[in-house]
Image: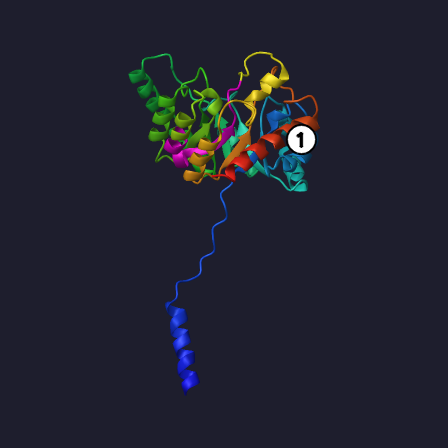
Amino acid sequence: MTSRRRFLQSLSALAAAPAFTAEPPPWKLNYMLASSMYGSLPLADILPEVKKTGATSIELWPKKHGTQREEIDTIGHDKFAALLKDHGLTFGGTTRYDLGPFRLTEEIAIVKKLGGTFIVAGGAGDYKVPPEQLKLNVKAFVEKMKPHAALAAENGLTLGIENHINNLIDTPDSLRWLADDIRNIPGIGIAFAPYHLPQEEKLLSDLIQHIDQKMTLFYAWEYGKSCSKAMPKEDELQQMPGRGKLDWKPLLQALKAIKFTGPTEIFMHPTPRGIPILPTLAESTAEIVRAKNHLDNLITTL
């Protein structure tokens, strides 16, 4: 009788005890490779490098930055899908500045077919105007984007609008306005490029937190000494994390705070466009890995 009573008491104690909950996995970046980092090299050369860089997926760029987006039209989308499967990779999406934000209907269908989740484009509209008019122009752009965003959302995609120099979304204010105006609109987000903004860690971190869940893609890309002209390679490489002056830790803290798990691309532009970031495939991969390790080491200190 006593043993039965103790057994029932132990059951009651177990029922009253809080349920065990496993610790969530530590936050980390979800790396994606931009094909343009290898210039115009063919996919047969690039795909074996993807996992070496710490990425599990690839984004395709068209000319003039790369040729891989055109290449899949040449070899066939089914062949490209088979190549991805052979290498154990997934497809992220495409960058289509060449099409602009209003001519993406066909691209949406292709990206969906291949299992991608985003298309990056720029903004559209007059940006050389006073701030009050710029704010209105951003709002007008968002209105024009609504049917395109709706189509993207119906197909499981997001149109990521990149902040880009000489573009409607060119300044911190225009970025904030865009984030506010698209807050409740499915199918549209922001591809955030620190390179194109003042290199102030607090400003960039605040923008990340303001964009919040509308962050579609994050470029690990700093200004360094710019990408606008030819220069010694060691100067050009200062666009890469860990080589330039930008302190990435506050930006990573902001990404962690918003629980960003979307794609992060370690990124730069070489001069001229369309060449790998370093002369050989192996050197280019090693440089991406170095930048990844820099970011990952910082994450361990957050």
In the displayed structure, would residue 127 be above or below residue 71?
above
Which amino acid type corresponds to the residue marked 1 in the rendered image?
Answer: Ile
- At a point 58% along the width and 23% down the height, the residue shown is 62
Q: In this orientation, does residue 64 appear?
A: no
Q: Provide residue 190's location: percent of width, then percent of height.
A: 43, 29
- At a point 41% along the width and 34% down the height, the residue shown is 214
The stretch drawn in magenta includes residue 3: no
Residue sticking out furthest to the front = 301
Judging depth in this view, the residue of 123 and 225 nearest the camera is: 225
Q: Provide residue 128's location: percent of width, then percent of height.
A: 37, 12
In the displayed structure, would residue 221 be above or below residue 29?
above
Residue identified by numbered label 1: 46
Question: Disc 1 on helix, strand or loop?
Answer: helix
In the displayed structure, would residue 109 be above or below residue 13?
above
The stretch drawn in magenta includes residue 216: yes
Stretch of the chain drawn in magenta: 207-224
